[in-house]
Image (cartoon, grey):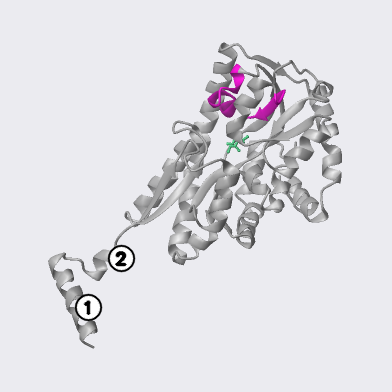
């Protein structure tokens, strides 16, 4: 009893002396760490900052999203595992990286699936997109929202002009079963590697090529070690921000909604920066001496035909979503 009284008195004095009232304690902001693989000036990272700005502004400073860019918190796969466990609050990654955990995402990254960016955005921002974001909860994630990432193309150390030229080449892919299947469908040898290891793998000849969009080809300096770029646009893989369900479950319903809305409202900003930077990146790599091969429509059709067996292998649940996506006009 005496002990309890002492504790009570100490707390009472501390409250007065330090002016720490309970309301002030609870006013400490909720700080959320967001992991990003790209450098600080990359359009997607700038999109993360815009998202963070909106969250802070709309919550009157109650929620602070801290962006850790340039892989400070690790490579995508490791970061996603940490998000699933609740050790990292959020991450912005490619859906390919998450698809190793949430296989339903395969339906959103199959080659030559979307007619164009507008088609993909109609899908992502419509009921099909909302449904897959919700599905993330079954895997201990929260699907926060999407960003643009253009389309992906192959780039190699030796020139590739046709789909046949890729046969037998070792191509780096993201660590995702679907991406392995995609490259294998073209008769190439898939080598899954973390993003940060691709430069040296190309340089030392561990791989003969890789694939990505124009901005990443430039920002990673892969153009220095793989100077042949073929514009085959084999797939459109959107970026996604996933949160930790463990962490989000501690937030109020209103705060969750605020975060998700902020992500949606940061989209047009990131999209505009993306489209502008895509052009800059293309021009820069051309100026730096990359050889760009534009595939003819007939050759593109050959790439598409080669991908058909990959579609045939998909489970019926995936194909059901694919058919819904295709039906969006
Ligand atoms: C980029 C994407 C990254 C990462 C990378 C890769 O386009 O923005 O998040 O997934 O591709 O190929 O690993």
Residue 36, given in percent of the width and then of the height, sits at: 50, 41
In the image, taking residue 118 as reference, residue 20 lies left or right, namely: left
In primary-sequence order, the first of circles 2 and 1 is 1
Q: Is residue 222 magenta?
A: yes
Within 8 Å: ligand 1 and the Cβ of disc 1? no
Q: Disc 2, ligand 1: is the CB inside 8 Å?
A: no
Give the x, y percent position of residue 92: 53, 44
Ligand 1 quarter of the rendering? top right
Magenta stretch bounds: 206-224
| SS label for mark 2 | helix
The residue sitting at 58% across, 46% down in the picture is 78
Q: Identify the residue at horizontal 57%, vertical 56% (top origin).
A: 84
Where is residue 25 drawn, in percent x and y?
Answer: 27, 65
Q: For residue 308, what is the image quadrant?
A: top right
* Disc 2: which residue: 26
Q: Is residue 106 left or right of residue 264?
A: right
Q: Nearer the viewer, residue 200 or 164?
A: 200
The answer to whether residue 145 is seen in the rendering is: yes
10 Å neighbourhood of mark 2: few (<14), some, or many (≥20)?
few
Residue picked out by circle 1: 7
Give residue 62's position: percent from left, percent from top: 34, 57
Mark 1 residue element: helix
Q: Nearer the viewer, mark 2 or mark 1?
A: 1
Query: Quick one: label 1, few (<14), some, or many (20+) residues within 10 Å?
Result: few
Q: Is residue 47 above or below residue 219?
A: below
Q: For this rendering, which residue is in front, 252 or 36?
A: 36
């Amino acid at each position: 009893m005496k002990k309890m009284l002492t504790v009570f008195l100490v707390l009472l004095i501390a409250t007065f002396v330090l002016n720490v009232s309970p309301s002030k304690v609870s006013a400490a902001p909720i700080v959320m760490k967001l992991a990003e693989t790209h450098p600080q000036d990359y359009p997607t990272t700038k999109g993360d900052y815009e998202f963070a700005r909106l969250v802070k502004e709309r919550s009157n400073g109650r929620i602070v999203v801290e962006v850790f860019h340039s892989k400070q918190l690790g490579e995508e796969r490791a970061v996603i595992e940490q998000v699933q466990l609740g050790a990292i609050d959020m991450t912005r990654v490619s859906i390919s990286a998450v698809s190793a955990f949430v296989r339903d995402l395969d339906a959103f990254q199959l080659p030559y699936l979307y007619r164009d960016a507008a088609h993909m955005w109609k899908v992502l921002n419509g009921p099909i997109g909302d449904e897959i974001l919700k599905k993330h909860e079954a895997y201990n994630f929260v699907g926060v929202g999407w960003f643009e990432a253009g389309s992906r193309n192959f780039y190699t150390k030796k020139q590739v002009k046709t789909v046949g030229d890729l046969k037998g080449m070792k191509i780096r892919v993201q660590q995702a079963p679907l991406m392995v299947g995609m490259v294998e469908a073209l008769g190439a040898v898939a080598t899954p590697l973390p993003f940060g290891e691709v430069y040296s793998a190309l340089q030392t000849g561990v791989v003969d090529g890789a694939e990505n969009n124009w901005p990443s080809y430039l920002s990673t300096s892969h153009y220095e070690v793989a100077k042949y770029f073929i514009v085959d646009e084999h797939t459109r893989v959107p970026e996604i921000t996933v949160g930790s369900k463990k962490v989000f479950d501690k937030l109020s319903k209103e705060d969750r909604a605020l975060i998700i809305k902020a992500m949606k409202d940061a989209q047009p900003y990131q999209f505009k920066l993306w489209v502008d930077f895509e052009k800059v990146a293309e021009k820069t790599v051309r100026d730096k001496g990359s050889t760009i091969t534009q595939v003819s429509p007939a050759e593109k059709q050959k790439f598409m035909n080669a991908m058909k067996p990959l579609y045939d292998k998909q489970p019926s649940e995936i194909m059901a979503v694919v058919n819904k996506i295709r039906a969006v006009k």
